Amino acid sequence: MAVKRTLAPGQPAPGARSKEKFVSLPEELEELELPPPQLEVPPSLFEDLNINDRISTAPKQRISVYCIAESLDRKMLEKKLEARGPRWLVSKYPDVLYGQYSSLESGQPTGDIFYFDYGCVSFWNLTPKQEQDVLKNLVVPCEVDPLPVREVEIDEFDVKYTANEGGGHIQNDTITLNYRLSGDHSIKLSISYALSQSTKLCVFEERVLEIVASTKDLPESLASTGKVTMSRKAIAQLIGKVFIQRAAVNLLSTVLDTPEFFWSAPDIMQTLYKRICEYMELDDRVEVLNNRFSVLHDMLELVSDVNETSHASYLEWIVIWLILICAVIGVFEVLGTLGIVGPGHHFP
């Protein structure tokens, strides 16, 4: 659960994503050549209850997306997945590995896992315990620059399969799809790309909020006292942090670009991806993040200028006092030369 932070004056409030937004998914999905459905249709006690009614009673499935590191060691992860068995590494893509989670009882796949090179993992239809097992034993050893615990981001969504015709929709963090799409991992990958990018973006949003929280008192102090209580070194460090995070977001733009997977995938997959991005408000959130960086940078530059002016004024007063002292000493030297002051002079 996100912690509410107090923003500095002039800082734009973080744009809360509207979960109630309704975004329809492309209807053309059902025109694809689909593999057999993966959804297990619950049995019924009533023989006359048709499959459509039984599907509607099936429980929702979980989607969990974790961002736990700056990136993952792809080669090491591939070796670990291959050692687990063929189902654990089904497909390789330019920036993601896809595998299945198999039930210990039946040996049949019950869930899907997508391992993204940029430090995110997307789980479909796994329990929290199963997710932690995969993270602990497979993913964590392959982390590159792991995130501190306080920066780890976890997003959860639901998938509801129905027998209704059409491409489905997403609303209230619940994705509704036709059950015939449940066995197509390309559809799940297209959705997971958008969800993982959103989760990755959350990491940078939280980092910027931390910087904002540490600077929220500066404008108030400047307005009330005309002085900056923070040292020049601390201000310089904050400016450095802002530049580092801004550069990281610029690098993140390569992650937020349309993934290479869609270059060769059917166009409908990219349309699906963009619809999920629309629901997650990725473009708006990136714009807000960049605006916040701009405000932070301008504020810190102003504070730095005020601090420099104050320091320069302090140095000027030191020079003035030194000149005054030199002038006084010079006057006494002249008076001594004239015999007005000195050891041999006697006052009447």
Image (cartoon, rainbow, N blue to C red):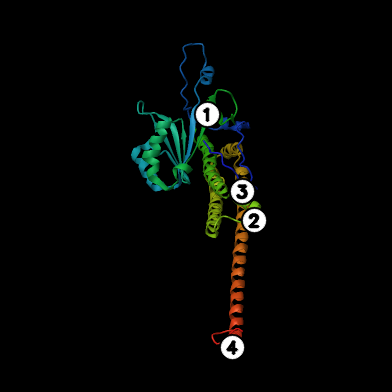
Using the image, tell me which numbered label, if any, was put on residue 292. Answer: 3
Tell which residue pokes out farthest to the front in this image. Answer: 348
> Which is in the foreground here, disc 4 or disc 1?
4
Residue type highlighted by circle 1 = Val
Tell which residue pokes out farthest to the left in this image. Answer: 83
CA separation in Å, label 4 and label 1: 99 Å
Query: How packed is label 3: few (under 14 Cα within 10 Å), some, or many (20 or more)?
Result: many
Left or right of 25 on screen, residue 142: left
> Which is in the foreground here, disc 2 or disc 1?
2
Does residue 81 appear in this view? Answer: no
CA separation in Å, label 3 and label 4: 67 Å
Query: How packed is label 2: few (under 14 Cα within 10 Å), some, or many (20 or more)?
Result: few
Q: Which residue is mark 2?
A: 226
Q: Which residue is mark 4?
A: 337
Q: Are marks 4 and 1 in contact (CB under 8 Å)?
A: no
Helix, strand or loop for disc 2: loop
Does residue 225 appear in this view? Answer: yes
Q: Which one is earlier in the sequence, the residue at label 3 or at label 4? A: 3
Expressed as whole percent of the image width and height from the top left, the position of residue 205 reads 55, 44
> Which is in the foreground here, disc 3 or disc 1?
3
Q: Which residue is mark 1?
A: 159
Left or right of 261 on screen, residue 225: right
